[in-house]
Image (spheres, coloured by chain):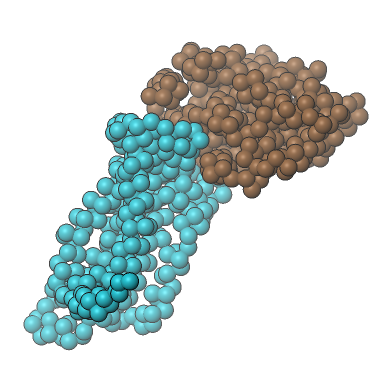
Amino acid sequence: MSTLDTSAIRKSLHGRLDDDRTIAWLFVAPAVVLLLLVAIYPFLTMIYNSLFNFTQAGRIDTFVAFQNYTTVLSDARFIGATGFTVAYVVVVVTVEFLLGMGISLLIYSKHVKRRQLLVVLSLPPMMLSPVVTGLTWRMLLTPEYGMVNHLFGTDIAWLASRPWSAVAVIVADIWMWTPLFVLVFTATMQSIPNVYYEAARVDGMSRWQQFKWVTLPQMRTAIAIVLLLRVVRAFKVFPKVQVLTLGGPGSYTETIAMITYNYGFRFFDLGRANAAGVLYWLLMFGAAYLIFKSVAEELISAKEGY
Amino acid sequence: MLTQLLNQFRAREASFDAFISDVIWTGSFMEPGFAEDLGPYFNSPLANDGYDYGDHLEVFAKNYGQWKGTRYGLPWYGDVMKLVVRKDVLEKHADAYKSKHGESIMPSYPKGYKSYDKFNRVAKFMHDNGWDMGLEGQRGWNIVYYYPNRFSAETGQAEMLNENGNSRLGSKGAETALQHYVDQAQWARNPLSTAYTQSRDQFLDGKTWAVEQWGTATAKFIDKYGWEEGVRVTLTPGGWPNLGGWGVLLNTYSDQEKKDAAFLLAQWATSKEMDKYSYTEHGVTPTRASSFTEDIKKQYPQARYHDPKENPGIRKLSLRPRNPKYQELGDTMQTQISEALSGSSSVSETITTIHQEWQNIMSGD
């Protein structure tokens, strides 16, 4: 009967545990496994499924290679939805950024008291679900009983005509998400040491120069993070538009998320839905990458980790 | 609800034994084999002797439960679109209209206006005299209810797809039908913002003189304005109202013991007694010939509208495609017609686009 030489194993294991790289891998392994399960595996499945046609019963049918991609890319509604979504993201994030910065500067002004209260009062729209936001604006904008037409003395079909339906969904988003910019920007402004402004004033800087050379650089990290979050989130817009306009009139306000949902869950064409999902992901990844490259990369790589 | 049900079927979900299906969903459930063939059940001891399947009017028996010659469902909830008009309002304009157009302004009961041409003349006249009609033109499924009323009235065809699955929308009649719809938007109250509940509320609030609506809503109108004092309910102009309604089906994946109970439940829910109850209490359309008793006709004079003996037009119903691809066909139709109603594309361009897209969808391109 042979005996197991445990001392050799202990020695080998002990040696490995002394190795920093092994320990680092052991620490990150749970996170990597989790990431593989909840993000990488579904993503790879999506790519795999996009290469097949499915039966009405939801089972994989025939391999069609890239046919689903050509179908999606030749669908005028997908192209239109992509154009609308990109325009929507650019407009809402830009306006929310400018409004958020403006409101934050007003709140941060030395003349304003009870800053915390003002910030808290601005938050409720952001706390509502997109469906509730959509329903609220739908009631405000309905021509029959809505408050907006009543206040302005107009007779506009806000949710069913061009260009007003696009204006309506954009305004609803700006109303909902500007508070996020206010919250983040105000909190960041509060954390900028006063000594920087005192030094700037000693150097004779105007208010605009102080904003440009002190405030903005100090806020760069916050701006990068909030922009990244909002761009990704705005690309995924779905329930608000679904409730407000159903993508209409025609397909004027249809978004990529809506048309992808339609492919999968209304037309039951899972191959086409997966192909649209991959294209959708590529677009979002591209946008996020651009933001990361332009404002966030050096901030994250500037410091070493723990 | 369709998406939720289909996803459960795809997961072979057995947590429910019976389910209800909208008339246009039948293909989606029956084609992939999600619903039970009821033939063996009716040949078993579970069949109730008094059930009398043949008592269901053919149009409902066929459309609520049959697919390619097999019986999968039983007619449970009948519904047919109707044109409801404010008779009291029209009477005030009757003389002026007659002197201008040389015809009666009032739709006859129960057959209604003979065509959408005639209806449009009245709609324009009423608009010029300060009364808008109700028109559901908001992007949504309501567009796919409204268009078939007009399509069938113009073409004399009940279905927009032929027996081979080809689109019939390439015809002149299909274009005229859309032209009627688009023209009506000029004489309607907020047509682009109006869907099912809005058109009902406009009429109940006294803001419109006419509206095409489903049966249950018309019961509310009669309650509010009074039968023949305030409102008159007729077939939609041209006499091809759209068919709605639901059937009861059995889940293929549920276990056998419970399916037997489900079959008993389905027979009870669609029995003669329940058909009368649903009509008299909730105003839904009877699906059985036996529901038109003398008592009921005396108590509910509007029953003449539903009775095929008195109103044979009730057998001529327009149908949305009862096809597994209905969702995509319907979505294309509502999106494109929404463009035409909002003035973004011409009528001929719109109907041509829908026709081509329907052909592509049905051919799988």
**Colour-to-chain, cyan:** A
Position of the C terminus of chain B by quadrant: top left
Q: Report which quarter residue A9 is drawn in.
A: bottom left
- Viewer-nearest residue: B282 or B184: B282
Expressed as whole percent of the image width and height from the top left, the position of residue B212 reads: 64, 30
Q: Report which quarter residue B142 is drawn in.
A: top right
Expressed as whole percent of the image width and height from the top left, the position of residue A117 reads: 42, 79
Q: Residue furthest right?
A: B295
Residue at 32% over, 66% down: A31
Expressed as whole percent of the image width and height from the top left, the position of residue B297 reads: 87, 27
Whether B58 is drawn above or below A249: the answer is: above
Residue at 19% over, 72% down: A21
Expressed as whole percent of the image width and height from the top left, the position of residue B361 reads: 43, 25
- Residue A54 visible: yes
Position of the N terminus of chain B by quadrant: top right
Residue at 48% over, 17% down: B166
- Viewer-nearest residue: A61 or B59: A61
- Residue B146 visible: no
**Colour-to-chain, brown:** B
Whether B245 is drawn above or below A3: the answer is: above
Q: Report which quarter residue B93 is drawn in.
A: top right
Q: Left or right of A248: which side holds B60? A: right
Whether B39 is drawn above or below A125: the answer is: above
Residue at 42% over, 64% down: A126
Q: Residue furthest left?
A: A203
- Viewer-nearest residue: A55 or B220: A55
